[in-house]
C-alpha cells in the first residue's frame, strides 16, 4: 500500500510564490512517479489550482524540488512507497529535479 504524506513547508514564502501543498485542486491529481531513477512521465500539463502527486516507486529515497521562478518548492527526502501532493496555484513552466540524482528532470506546465 502506498503511504500518504502531506507536507507543509515555509507556508508564507510558498503562498507568496503561488505554491501550496495539501489537498484541493480543480480535478483529479496528476501523478509523476519516481521509477528507475527517472520521473515518469517526464512532462505534464495541468491547470492553475491542480495538484501533482509525486510518488516514489523506487526502493530508495529521492528529494523532489523545483528551482523555477514563482514555483520554488522542496518536498525533502521522500521515502520509498510514499507520495507527496503539491498544488500549483500560479501559471508557468516548472522544472522538477531530484537533489540526490541530478540527471532526474521533469517539467510541469501550468496553464491559466
Image (cartoon, helix red, strand yellow):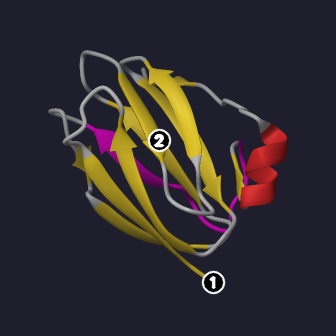
Residue under the image location 24 percent in, 31 percent down = 101
Callout 1: helix, strand or loop? loop
From the viewer's perspective, is the residue at label 2 or at label 1 nearer?
2
Magenta segment includes 32: yes
Picture coordinates of residue 34, whole percent (x, y): 29, 37
Could you say which is closer to the camera, residue 5 or residue 69?
69
- Most distant residue in the right direction: 12
Q: Please rate how many residues cluster around mark 1, counting C-alpha atoms within 10 Å: few if below 14, some from 14 to 19, many from 20.
A: few
Q: Say whether marks 2 and 1 touch (CB < 8 Å).
A: no
Picture coordinates of residue 1, whole percent (x, y): 42, 20
Magenta segment includes 99: no
Callout 2: helix, strand or loop? strand
Picture coordinates of residue 72, whole percent (x, y): 58, 50
Whichever of callouts 2 and 1 sits on the residue coming sooner in the sequence is 2
Q: Please rate how many residues cluster around mark 2, counting C-alpha atoms within 10 Å: few if below 14, some from 14 to 19, many from 20.
A: many
Res. 35 mark:
none
- Distance from disc 2 to disc 1, alpha carbons, whole Å, reads 22 Å
- Looking at the rendering, the stretch of residues picked out in magenta corresponds to 22-34
Q: Is residue 81 left or right of residue 57?
A: right
Residue under the image location 35 percent in, 44 percent down = 97
Dominant SS type (magenta): loop
Quadrant position of residue 33: top left
Q: Is residue 16 above or below residue 59?
A: below
Residue under numbered circle 2: 65
Residue under the image location 69 percent in, 61 percent down = 25
Residue under numbered circle 1: 112
Q: Is residue 59 left or right of residue 20?
A: left
- Most distant residue in the left direction: 36
Q: Is residue 50 left or right of residue 3?
A: right
Amino acid at each position: 500500500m502506498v503511504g500518504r504524506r502531506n507536507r507543509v513547508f515555509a507556508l508564507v514564502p510558498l503562498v507568496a510564490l503561488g505554491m501550496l501543498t495539501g489537498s484541493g485542486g480543480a480535478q483529479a491529481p496528476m501523478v509523476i512517479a519516481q521509477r528507475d531513477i527517472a520521473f515518469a512521465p517526464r512532462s505534464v500539463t495541468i491547470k492553475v489550482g491542480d495538484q501533482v502527486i509525486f510518488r516514489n516507486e523506487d526502493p530508495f529515497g529521492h528529494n523532489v524540488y523545483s528551482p523555477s521562478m514563482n514555483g520554488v518548492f522542496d518536498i525533502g527526502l521522500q521515502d520509498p512507497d510514499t507520495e507527496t501532493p503539491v498544488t500549483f496555484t500560479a501559471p508557468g513552466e516548472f522544472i522538477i529535479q531530484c537533489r540526490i540524482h541530478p540527471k532526474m528532470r521533469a517539467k510541469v506546465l501550468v496553464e491559466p
